[in-house]
Image (spheres, rainbow, N blue to C red):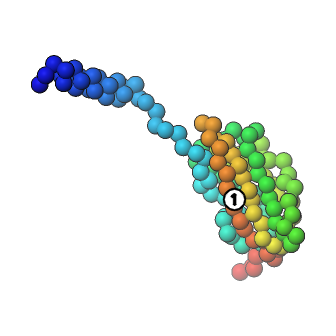
């Protein structure tokens, strides 16, 4: 092996060892919604809460949630968010909702600074669930 090739191999090996020893953190991803209440495309009677749970901690002051729907497809005023929700969760008590289709539009900033957005559609029947 030539002296130049040997120096190159040693430099590569040293770089690999350094990377393993310093524990270079993995790339951070965007906040991904894990679950919602109501669930996506669900048909529900009268939901009392709106809950969006993500895979990472959120910068809650920089997040926004809008609810649009009902018979006239208008914005619904959300009540104050629940202050005791987990760091990865946005939760709101819901006002009474009229029957119709609804869509929750959300835009969140994860703790790593990435912004993601999406929507969760659901339908409200307004009927109480049947008793068994």
Left or right of residue 21, residue 46 in this image: right
Q: Quadrant of the C terminus?
A: bottom right
Q: Position of residue 83 (x, y in %)?
A: 77, 42
Task: State the image quarter where residue 5 is shown.
Answer: top left
Q: Residues within 10 Å of mark 1 (few under 14, many from 20)?
A: some
Left or right of residue 71, residue 56 in this image: left
What residue is shown with label 1?
119
Identify the residue shown where x is 80% and y is 47%.
Answer: 81
Left or right of residue 88, residue 102 in this image: right
Q: How many marks?
A: 1
Check the image and report above or below for 97 versus 128: above
- Element type at mark 1: strand
Q: Nearer the viewer, residue 80 or 113?
A: 113
Q: Position of residue 120 (x, y in %)?
A: 69, 61
Identify the residue shown where x is 49% and y is 38%.
Answer: 27
Left or right of residue 129, residue 28 in this image: left
Identify the residue shown where x is 73% and y is 44%.
Answer: 63
Task: State the image quarter where residue 23 is shown.
Answer: top left
Q: Position of residue 24 (x, y in %)?
A: 43, 30
Q: Quadrant of the N terminus?
A: top left
Report whether residue 36 is seen: yes
Q: Position of residue 8 (x, y in %)?
A: 24, 24
Report whether residue 84 is seen: no
Residue extending farthest left: 1
Q: Nearer the viewer, residue 64 or 55?
A: 64
Identify the residue shown where x is 85% and y is 60%.
Answer: 75
Check the image and report above or below for 89 versus 46: above
Check the image and report above or below for 125 versus 92: below
Check the image and report above or below for 32 versus 98: above
């Amino acid at each position: 092996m030539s002296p130049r090739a040997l120096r190159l191999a040693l430099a590569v090996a040293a770089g690999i060892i350094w990377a393993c020893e310093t524990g270079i953190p993995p790339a951070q991803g965007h906040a991904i919604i894990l679950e919602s209440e109501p669930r996506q495309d669900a048909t529900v009677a009268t939901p009392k809460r709106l809950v969006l749970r993500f895979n990472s901690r959120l910068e809650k002051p920089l997040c926004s949630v809008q609810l649009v729907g009902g018979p006239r497809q208008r914005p619904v005023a959300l009540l104050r968010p629940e202050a005791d929700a987990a760091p990865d969760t946005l939760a709101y008590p819901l006002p009474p909702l009229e029957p119709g289709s609804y869509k929750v539009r959300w835009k969140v900033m994860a703790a790593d600074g990435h912004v993601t957005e999406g929507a969760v559609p659901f339908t409200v029947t307004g009927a109480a669930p049947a008793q068994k």
